[in-house]
Amino acid sequence: MPPLFEELKRRKVIRVVVAYVVVGWLLIQIAETTFAPIGLPDWTLRLVIVLVALGLPLAAVLAWAFDITPGGVIRTPAVAAPSAMSIAVLPFPDMSAEKDQEHFCDGLTEELLNALTRIPKLRVASRTSSFSFKGKEVDLREAAEKLHVAHILEGSVRTSGNRIRVTAQLVETATDSHLWSETYDRELDDIFAIQDDIASRVLEAMRCRLGTDKLVDATTEDPKAYQYFLRGLGYALSGSKRDMQLSIDMAQKAVDTDPEFLRAWLLLAEQCSLYSLFFSREEQWSKRAYRAAEEATRLAPERAESCLALGYAHATRERFGEAEAALRKAIELDPKLGRAWHHLARALQHQGKVQDAAIHFEKAADFDPDDFVSPLLATTMYFALHDTKASERMARIGVERAQRVLGDYPDNQRAYYLGAAGWYMLGEKSKALQWTDKALELNPNDPATRYNAACLFAKFPEKHEQALELLEMSVKSRSWMENDADLDPLRAYPRFKAILDSLAD
């Protein structure tokens, strides 16, 4: 366990106590100067002093037990000493003069994360947690405490023409020791070797046995194609409509440069599928998703990610039975592929297999401690099954994770609108409405935000008209609406039936 003083700092007890003493002293001074002139008896001043004194230990206890976040008050997590075999990779900033390599840098960071996660027994902090430090001045010890790791890998990237300079250093935060550092000044064509060398040297410095001779699974030998891929990977991280389009463009350039580039085909299939599902129902996106999935399957038919890509593509055409089969094969090939469990649950839900969907959403939640989406979707599935106990259990998990994510990403409307369903399940109806309103404030025209807001408003009779208005410009999937129990209170409205009839089977 960390020293008591460090733990008091982490839980902000010292800050709260100091603030309380200052405010308490001011209250006593105000009471001392005003009570007598307005005729209050002497005992009232003594009462104020006693109440301030009694409140101090209470304030300290509450500060120890709870944190205040943008999403609300949450219980402060206890901290055990992190494993010596744990690491976080902080985003490598772009130090180029033109400042035009941000997404390349993000892709490079993501690749280092992917390389390190391939090592057995090495715990790597999730991308969501690590990227919360992007663009911020970072105290490495505080970052390590927050991410619950013993080591931090940080660095920077500078490009000029076809030259790249990558600096990297590995820090053991408990002792503030630099276990390893290096500067690579190379041609961009050497990016493969740079990444593999960084990962290998990090593991060597941590005295970890290498699980494989080659850590970076590039699946191409063309450096230009790989540079396009890294940029595409960087754009894919945000999930916004514009960045998803740019990710698709970069992935397409990568496969145009090297048609045998497996991972670029996988990225292209995933991004085209997600664009089709969430931003546009134009046939071109589904066609491109299928083409990319088929190419990936041709190159690696027994690779789990190829089956995952095919499952995505089937979902764009609402072939949910075929999507289920492809996703089950992906899980059979790689049971630790959390995304496959999540999308299998979605395919099952579309087919009305609500019980199985709930189980698979819950399973998906086990793979990523930052995944608030899966437990909150499991909440709605269990609610539809009238399993209140399971629904409340998953709601608590989902809301706690959503609050934690909002602490790092306060403009994440998805955490707000999905978290609202969790609050409702926990009986916090006013909180549910507040979070839904916040999501709509952040992105009022986003189809997913409008749909989930409609699901929440459907639970309040006075908001049914607003729910129907939101539905008219949201979901494009008839099967999802037909199987979503959250919308049951709206089904008797002619306007709801008209919306349903307007959607293709």
Image: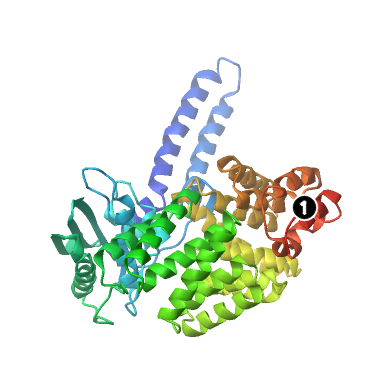
Image side of residue 290 versus residue 221, left or right: right
Specify whether residue 67 is in view: no
Please identify the quarter of the rendering in which residue 259 is found: bottom left
Seen from the viewer's position, the closer of residues 184 and 207 is: 184
Tag count:
1
* 47 lies above or below 316: above
Relative vertical location of residue 247 with respect to residue 460 in this rendering, above or below: below
In percent of width and height, residue 465 lies at 79, 43
Count residues near mark 1 (Cα–Cα under 10 Å), then give few for <14, some for 14-19, many for 20+: some
Q: Residue furthest top?
A: 37
Give the quarter of the image for residue 374. Answer: bottom right
Point 80% across, 59% down: residue: 488
Q: Nearer the viewer, residue 396 or 488?
A: 488
Q: Residue at x 40, y 61 (%)?
A: 252
* Residue behind mark 1: 499
Res 477 seen here: yes
Residue for point 46% across, 32% down: 23
The image quadrant where one finds the C terminus is bottom right
The amino acid beneath tag 1 is Ile
Name the spot of residue 369 as percent of width and height, x first.
48, 66
Q: Which structural element holds mark 1?
A: helix
